[in-house]
Image (tube, rainbow, N blue to C red):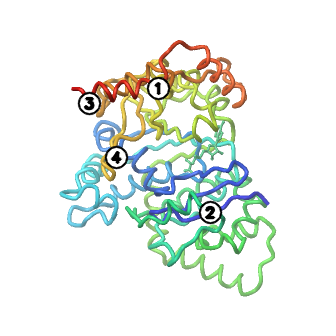
Amino acid sequence: MREIYPYFTNDSSVGLYSPEDNDIYHSTYGALTEAYEKFIYPANLEEFFINNSEIKILDICFGIGYNTKSFLNFLYSAQIYTNNNTTNNNYIDKIYTDNYNTIKNLHEAIKNKKIKIFIKAIDTDKILAGISPFIICNKNNLPDNYTLPFQNEKIQKLLNKPIKNKIKFYEEINLILMTKIQENYPEIINNSEIFKILRSKKYNEYFAKNYALIKAFYYSIGYIITPLERLNMFLHNIYYQYVSTSYKKALKWLRFNDFTFELKIDDARNELLNDNNLYNFIFLDAFTPAKCPCLWTIDFFKLLYKHLANDGMVLTYSNSASIRNALINAGFFVGKIYTPSSNKFMGTVAVKNKSLIKNELSEYDLSLIKTKAGIFYRDENLDALNDEIIIRHNNDIKNSDLISSSKFIKEYRKQHVKL
Ligand SMILES: C[S@@+](CC[C@H](N)C(=O)[O-])C[C@H]1O[C@@H](n2cnc3c(N)ncnc32)[C@H](O)[C@@H]1O
């Protein structure tokens, strides 16, 4: 069985660790928090929807879908928001303490509008997409004395920090996604490996079991159901279809809006070479450049440029000088993302229309780009292996006359102490 280790991150949403890659897929700080802070809030959806009722999103590296789900979750909370209540969303309430401007403004922008949503999600891993709709989010709190289900001191240490920023995640969103995946990609969700992961006792607490479609899923996989389980499922389905307000709300939301979800299990480079869409927002959530350089090259960014609408925005968590330099050289205007909860600039946005940038790169950021740290990854034919791209990049750095970033930082600090 494929090895993945789920664990609860610091906002009580589930993160994954892969022993094969020896890497985490989600920030221990909070998988859901990161999706909101890096991809959803900086998109300024409340402004976008003032003049638009149609949106196209490209979610590169879908994984278990936090970015797509957070977008839907945010839109859903805005659509059901009423002026007399708070957002009911602890995280938004916490950030926007004085008023609820963002959610209120988004609500105003989409009020009574039927929104046409198209999301294309790409990932090379179909197992992750398959377990995505079952992931638990917003578990009220982490279990007492919670320890990771695997030995990894670094992650364990990070997780020992107190829990921050619990985001209200509407379960309806998982249900909506499940409906779409089950309808259009039964071969993904009915995959026997996914079934084993979902049935595994050791992963039990990380996956929700109570969805209306689970019965069909169990049957289709050839699972032999005991009479008691059969009765439970029968009652469960009745509950969901006829009684559960959450299910009714989700269906109403889905029917009211026009939502298309396209999932591609492919290398993002290949998929985009065969795609003719123009996107309003592109979420780029690849592993770090050291692990997955093929999705951080200047050549891949040129491809993204072709797929971005004139008023569109590419969003990523990366702060790297090399990534920012590659984006600039691919033709974008580049800015950074302000994160209110930590009062820091983290992440990068790339646009064609400069006026969309809220936080410009500083003089320091721009100077860093001109050092060796700014040398970007290359993949001219968009088909190189990650190792090949890394070797090429190391050679480019070795053969460059540019100042090293450490020397630059030292000199910069000296000058700024003098001033
Ligand atoms: C940091 S994780 C993304 C997490 C994800 N956004 C989520 O919400 O779960 C990186 C993802 O990139 C995928 N990936 C790696 N190489 C890829 C490629 N060349 N094209 C598309 N996806 C790729 C991996 O399978 C993994 O799911």
Q: Please say if the residues under marks 3 and 1 sit with CB atoms less than 8 Å apart.
A: no
Q: CA distance from mark 2 to mark 1?
A: 37 Å
Q: Nearer the viewer, mark 3 or mark 2?
A: 3
SS at badge 3: helix
Q: Is residue 167 above or below residue 286?
A: below
Task: Residue under label 4, please give it.
Answer: 339
Q: CA distance from mark 3 to mark 1?
A: 18 Å
First-in-chain label (3 vs 1): 1
Q: Nearer the viewer, mark 1 or mark 4?
A: 1
Q: Please say if the residues under marks 2 and 1 sit with CB atoms less than 8 Å apart.
A: no
Which quadrant of the figure contains the N terminus? bottom right
Residue type beneath disc 4: Thr
First-in-chain label (1 vs 4): 4
Residue type beneath disc 3: Val
Mark 2 Cα shell of 10 Å, populated few (<14), some (14-19), many (≥20): many
Task: Residue under label 1, please give it.
Answer: 405
**Whether the residue under disc 4 has CB within 8 Å of ligand 1:** no
Left or right, 15 with reference to 246:
right
Task: Residue under label 2, please give it.
Answer: 6
Query: In the image, residue 172 lies at what x, y percent?
Result: 48, 64
Q: Please say if the residues under marks 4 and 3 sit with CB atoms less than 8 Å apart.
A: no
Task: Residue under label 3, please give it.
Answer: 417
SS at badge 2: strand
First-in-chain label (3 vs 2): 2
